[in-house]
């Protein structure tokens, strides 16, 4: 994953409430998916108050009792709201909105849940949890694409799961999916942005910079592309351009900790 300020940007937005998973015994034979989400939920529950745990158990029991799809969807949304608004824990929230979306099977709900997982991937430092999140996002994007096979944003999202999540032994599969969109529609800035990030991750810095400059010209207020460009130039050893893009990025950042880190990065580049 990209290092430096670009990664820090995602950590500040998504990483603060993502709990680490506990290590599993290798002798366990439960599926990776079920074992992972259960460990995530167990870890998150430990941080709840007694009254919150009691309320949560009541909601969870409602799922077991519910035999009507609409009732299950309602409870999943209630659980999602609990984890987001009361517990302030975003991974369990993502899980339950994803489960609700699978039952609802609408393009809108599937896309929302998939995108929420995807946006959290760069800030996730636990490899097992990252792979699980990427797999969940991939499944949701694929279900949405079944409903709307011509949606290029969904295709780029699907390809991005491979970039961020290490869910395949052939990570270039993600690049292939995204490049098909970009080649057909060069003005698709989402595809260009993700290909630029793919170039950073694979060390193809010149190609990454070329694509990211296109996005920066079209979207001058896009903080992500500015920090990606700074990252790419810094990795390339081009200190002058790295400092330029860090300075440009600073103009759009309000978080004082982020600004402090960027100033520190610029200071190091000046030496």
Image: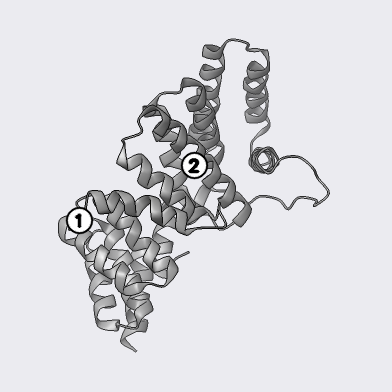
Judged from the image, the secondary structure of the residue bearing numbered disc 1 is: loop
What residue is drawn where x is 63% and y is 11%? Answer: 67
Q: Position of residue 271 (x, y in %)?
A: 34, 89
Q: Quadrant of residue 75?
A: top right
User: Residue shown at 28%/56% (left/top)?
Assistant: 192
Per the rendering, the mark at residue 138 is 2
Coloring applied to the structure = one colour
Image quadrant where residue 10 sits? bottom left
Outermost residue toward the right in this view? 27
The percent position of residue 239, horizontal first and vertical second, equals: 30, 82
Q: Residues within 10 Å of mark 2 (few under 14, many from 20)?
A: many
Position above or below: 53 against 11: above
Residue at x-position 31% and y-position 36%: 151
Nearer to us of marks 1 and 2 is: 2
Label 1 or label 2, whichever comes before in sequence order: 2
Q: Tell me, yes or no, whether the two marked residues, 1 and 2, touch with CB atoms within 8 Å.
A: no
User: x%, y% of residue 149?
Assistant: 36, 33
Q: Check residue 210 in the rendering and tell me which mark sits there, or answer none.
A: none
Q: Nearer the viewer, residue 231 or 186?
A: 186
Relative to 168, say whether 40 is above or below: above
Instruction: Give the side of residue 214 with respect to residue 170, left or right.
Output: left
Q: What residue is pinned by disc 1?
A: 221
Q: Is residue 186 left or right of residue 138?
A: left
Q: Is residue 255 visible?
A: no
Q: CA distance from mark 1 to mark 2?
A: 29 Å
| Residue drawn at the location 62% of the way across and 29% of the way down | 52
Crowding at dot 1, Cα within 10 Å, few <14 / some 14-19 / many 20+, comes out as: some
Image coordinates for residue 87, horizontal then vertical, percent: 55, 36
């Amino acid at each position: 994953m990209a290092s430096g300020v670009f990664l820090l940007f995602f950590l500040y937005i998504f990483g603060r409430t993502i709990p680490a998973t506990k290590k599993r015994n290798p002798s366990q034979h439960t599926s990776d998916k079920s074992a992972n989400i259960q460990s995530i939920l167990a870890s998150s529950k430990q941080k709840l108050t007694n009254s919150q745990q009691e309320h949560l158990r009541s909601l969870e029991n409602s799922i077991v009792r519910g035999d009507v799809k609409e009732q299950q969807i309602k409870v999943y949304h209630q659980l999602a709201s609990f984890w987001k608004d009361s517990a302030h824990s975003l991974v369990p929230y993502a899980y339950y909105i994803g489960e609700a979306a699978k039952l609802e099977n609408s393009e809108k709900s599937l896309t929302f849940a998939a995108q929420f997982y995807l946006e959290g991937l760069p800030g996730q430092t636990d490899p097992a949890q990252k792979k699980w999140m990427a797999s969940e996002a991939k499944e949701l994007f694929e279900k949405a694409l079944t409903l709307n096979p011509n949606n290029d944003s969904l295709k780029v999202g699907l390809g991005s799961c491979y970039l961020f999540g290490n869910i395949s032994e052939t990570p270039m599969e993600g690049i292939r999916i995204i490049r098909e969109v970009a080649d057909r529609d060069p003005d698709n800035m989402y595809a260009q942005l993700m290909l630029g990030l793919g170039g950073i991750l694979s060390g193809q810095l010149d190609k990454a910079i070329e694509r990211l400059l296109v996005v920066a010209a079209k979207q001058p207020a896009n903080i992500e592309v500015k920090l990606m460009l700074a990252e790419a130039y810094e990795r390339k050893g081009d200190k002058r351009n790295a400092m330029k893009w860090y300075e440009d990025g600073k103009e759009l950042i309000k978080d004082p900790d982020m600004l402090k880190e960027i100033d520190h990065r610029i200071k190091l580049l000046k030496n």
